[in-house]
Amino acid sequence: MRCIYRGGMNIGHKITKAPLRLALAATLTAGLPATALIAPSAPLEAAEGDLDKAISALRAVSTMKADFTQTDRQGNTTRGVMTLKQPGKIRFEYEKSVNMLVVSTGKSLYLIDYDVSQVQRWPIKNSPLGALLDPNRDIKRYGKLMQTGNRDVLGVEVRDPKRPEFGVITLIFVRNAGAPGGFELTHWVALDSQNNRTTIRLRNQRYGVAVPDSTFKFKDPRKTSRRPG
């Protein structure tokens, strides 16, 4: 079973092809439901400037590698390695059992499914996802601070009210003096327009690592699958 999703960035576990693509589709274009970190009832007052702190934490990361786990709403989980390079480049490489790849080149986000020799593309410019992948853009255009029950936890919800098909992404940052900007992105939840939800959790974050641009190139299965004649 694979689960992958397009809005915030769902990325897969081997299940069936349809749920997998739907999940990833949701992750690629979109959120976080109410959890223990997001307390909608009687939350603490959000400190002035906390949104700026979260934006600063994103902007302070030039490159990053992290191990990730992706979990869908059925509890199916897959793992892999995420590589990020600002501005705009990201790669989700799944464990060997998941023959898929998610790559952003800075202009477009691609879902490459090698099992069926298929490539799907989503433009990221002027979308919530684009604002997140390139934090030098005006994140405040799409993002708002979520009140939490912990002063050391920041939640930022990103959505475009004019483009509900993009879904919602909520990023969670935890105070960490060792992370760029003093806050570390620990996980996010993506919710697509069909309420498909995927949670991505990061661990073992490594900052400032050497990442060549070739990391964000991929082998196009459509070319290799074509037969001459």
Image (cartoon, rainbow, N blue to C red):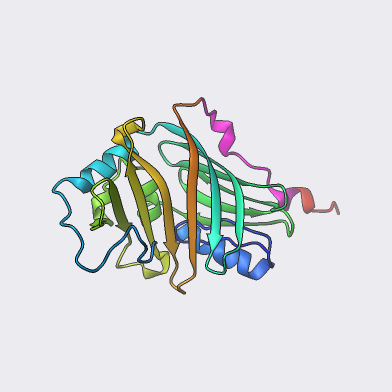
Residue at the outermost left position: 48
Q: The C terminus is located in which quarter?
A: bottom right
Q: Residue at x 55, y 51 (%)?
A: 69
Residue 177 as seen in the image, left or right of residue 69: left
Which picture quadrant has residue 49? top left
Query: Camera-side residue: 122 or 12?
Result: 12
Residue 220 as seen in the image, left or right of residue 7: right
Relative to 162, does residue 178 appear above or below in the rendering? above
Residue 212 part of the magenta-drawn span = yes
x%, y% of residue 65? Answer: 51, 35
Number of callouts:
0
Q: Residue at x 31, y 58 (%)?
A: 157
Which picture quadrant has residue 54? top left
x%, y% of residue 96? Answer: 71, 47
Residue 61 part of the magenta-drawn span = no
Range of residues picked out in magenta: 210-223
x%, y% of residue 144? Answer: 24, 57
